[in-house]
Image: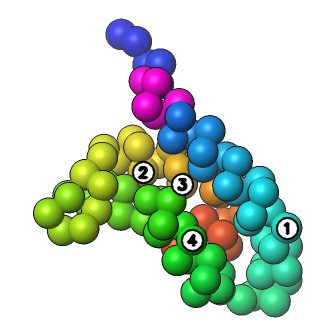
Amino acid sequence: MDFSLTEEQQALKETARAFAQKELAPIAAGLESDNAPLSHDMVKRMAELGFLGINIPEELGGLGLSNLDALIVLEELAKVSSAVAFPAF
């Protein structure tokens, strides 16, 4: 059995990783120390990138991808901080 990611999943992973490192890492420590939520603007940015509702059916406004696809994104965001990953969860 092959457990390799598809090309699409690898691209999704790389996109999520780049976003997390560039945009979320700089604010993560402050959110954790202040016990503050991610800003509305940043949650909106995550939505624009398709990171919210990944595994929700398209007819309900999601991307209609698999649970694995959602977990790939969640894992990359959580590598930075659970505080910034929570909205995607």
Q: Is residue 74 above or below residue 3?
A: below
Q: CA distance from mark 2 to mark 4?
A: 16 Å
Query: What secondary structure is found at the residue carrying circle 1?
Result: helix
Q: What residue type is disc 3 on?
A: Leu
Considering every residue shown, the one lying at the far front of the view is 48
Q: Which residues are magenta?
A: 6-10
Distance from label 3 to label 2 (Cα)? 6 Å
Q: Are marks 3 and 2 in contact (CB under 8 Å)?
A: yes
Q: Please state which amino acid type lies under the numbered disc 4.
A: Arg
Q: What secondary structure prevails in the magenta region? A: helix
Q: Pointer 1: what residue?
A: 26
Q: What number is the disc on residue 70?
A: 2
| Residue for point 62% across, 38% down | 14
Which of the two marks, 4 or 1, is nearer to us in this view? 4
- Give the position of the N terminus as an image quadrant: top left
Label 2 neighbour load within 10 Å: few <14, some 14-19, many 20+: many
What residue does disc 3 label?
74
**Image location of residue 84, percent across then percent down:** 66, 70
- In the picture, the disc for residue 45 is 4
Dot 2: element: helix
User: With 13 as the anchor, is 79 left or right in this view?
Assistant: right
